Image (spheres, grey):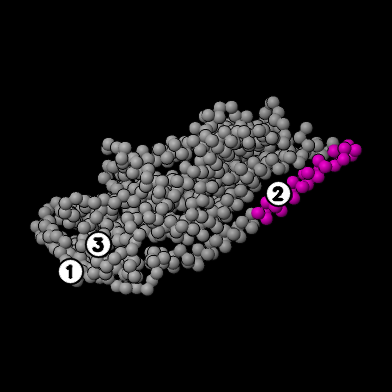
Amino acid sequence: MIITVRSITFYLFTFLFFFSPSLASEHDHKYEPDEHVILWVNKVGPYYNPQETYNYFILPFCHPDGHIEHRWGGLGEVLGGNELIDSQLDIKFKKNVDKTVVCELKLDASKATQFKDAIENSYWFEFFIDDLPLWGFVGEYRFDKNGENPKHMLYTNKNLIIKYNGNQIIHVNMTQDGAKPVEDGRVYELTYTVTWIPTDISFAKRFEVYLDYPFFEHQIHWFSIFNSFMMVIFLTGLVSMILMRTLRNDYAKYAREDDDLESLERDVSEECGWKLVHGDVFRPPRSLSLLSAFVGTGAQLAALIFLVIILAIVGMLYTGRGAIITTFIVCYALTSFIAGYVGGGMYSRNGGKNWIKSTVLTASLFPFLCFGIGFLLNIVAIFYGSLAAIPFGTMVVVFIIWAFISFPLALLGTVVGRNWNGAPNNPCRVKTIPRPIPEKKWYLTPTIISLMGGLLPFGSIFIEMYFVFTSFWNYKVYYVYGFMLLVFMILIIVTICVTIVGTYFLLNAENYHWQWTSFFSAASTAIYVYLYAIYYYRVKTKMTGLFQTSFYFGYTMMFCLGLGILCGAVGHLGSNLFVRRIYRNIKCD
């Protein structure tokens, strides 16, 4: 595909001005009587495979005459696998249309086979009128009175029901009838009707009909929030009561007067646990540049998720095609400064010298991991000829956003972080010779602590994961972002508390390699989410085929990578504050 300057300019224009309401649609949603209303046909595909979608005219429906008008709605819409085409049906505002023939469709053997395969695989399609979606099935199976001899029935008539208030369209619906057997050589008249009905529903509430209130506001959803909230209280109380009490007793030993020499010598001879590793606990971790990149990226993702949730609550982004995706990309680029600042400051505080390497890793680690997964999925989508395949022009636009916005901001953040937050300020001096780590029981090893650390954070988001997965994989519009914000904050608090407890146990085992352990302890939450995704795929969905399976586990892997990096960074930063706090109050020399 040849990319022209004009096409790139168009994509950038769409990207930069996406949030302008006047450019989010082709008009201001106001119509004059008898003004033409466009019915856009979008995509078609197997109902149980949400990502396996194709151009509507991959099936031998009636094609528009002459020039086919496409509508490109922006970066997020393209990445979401949408391709709107003008159906050229004669629909005018407030003007009813009796049954009208669109075209005569004659099926040959090839076309009949296409429709039969589509009906067998429960193919559905999506239309849009005034940015409001319509859905329907291509056809259905019908059996005789004895439940035998199934026939492939093709719907030939579409009844469009449009409700309006004043000069605005409020609600659209579609029913289908005229089902006829799919037979080779048969001629069908494809028809449609349009009925306009006035309503008193306001334009601001027109999208509420697509929201499944009973599902998302079910009692179990409220109960899950309460359960997670109680977990937060329990964990914060546990950290405050047990750890602080233990540490207070340890501090008391160091606060005694030096004249009690005999008592002091006895305490020193009995000293054990976390106090013995004060000369090694601030030793720079292995692969410092990689850990700094992970922590910086995780801090960026935490800020990104918080910002996107707030924008979704305020701006109701779920009402627009691709709005969430576009918002995510824009906010990711703009929050890259945070990644550079946190990662660069951490790298410099620990004595890192090659800050260019750290910057490149921080700016490119997560995007390139996602790009690698997305590249493989794109090959599958291209092989199948699906709309899920990302056009080359869109890839160029995304790369331009990364190269000219995200990377420079990460570089700026690294420079600022090195100068403002990069000075070493360890409470204890690092000894020249590393202290040997003694053998401990199996449950105090870094591996076990890391694996156990993700259980409680996963438990705090378990119910919400069900609602998120269901909305993404089962055609439900997720709109309860207030719930998501609460669960996200609970996840952050639970992750910090659990990681602090795990770090304390590790240091008490005289193991000073807490940096990577604290990261993996929190990041292991993503492992349990991925295991839950496998269970959800097998039990809660009816997905089939290489295409949908690869997209399901590929998208889930992207999500879990982001979640793992986010939680790992939060856990590490929380443990870092905890470690500095406890070693600041002891006599290290």
Three-letter amino acid code of the residue under disc 2:
Leu
State which tag comes first along the sequence, 3 or 2.
3
Residue ID for mark 1: 99
Position in image of residue 19 (x %, y %): 42, 52
Q: In percent of the image, x 30 and y 59: which residue is there?
A: 128
- In which quadrant of the rendered view does residue 100 lie? bottom left
| Residue underneath mark 3 | 36
Magenta span of residues:
236-264
Q: Main secondary structure of the magenta part?
A: helix
Residue 470 forms part of the magenta stretch: no
Badge 3, how many Cα within 10 Å: few under 14, some, many 20+? some
Q: Residue at x 51, y 57 (%)?
A: 484
Image quadrant assignment for residue 93? bottom left
Residue at 17% from the left image edge and 69% from the top image edge: 99
Residue 243 is labelled as 2
Instruction: Tell which residue pokes out farthest to the front in this image.
Output: 32
Q: What's the amino acid at mark 3? A: His
**Residue closest to the eye, 8 or 430:** 8
Three-letter code for the amino acid on which mark 1 is drawn? Lys
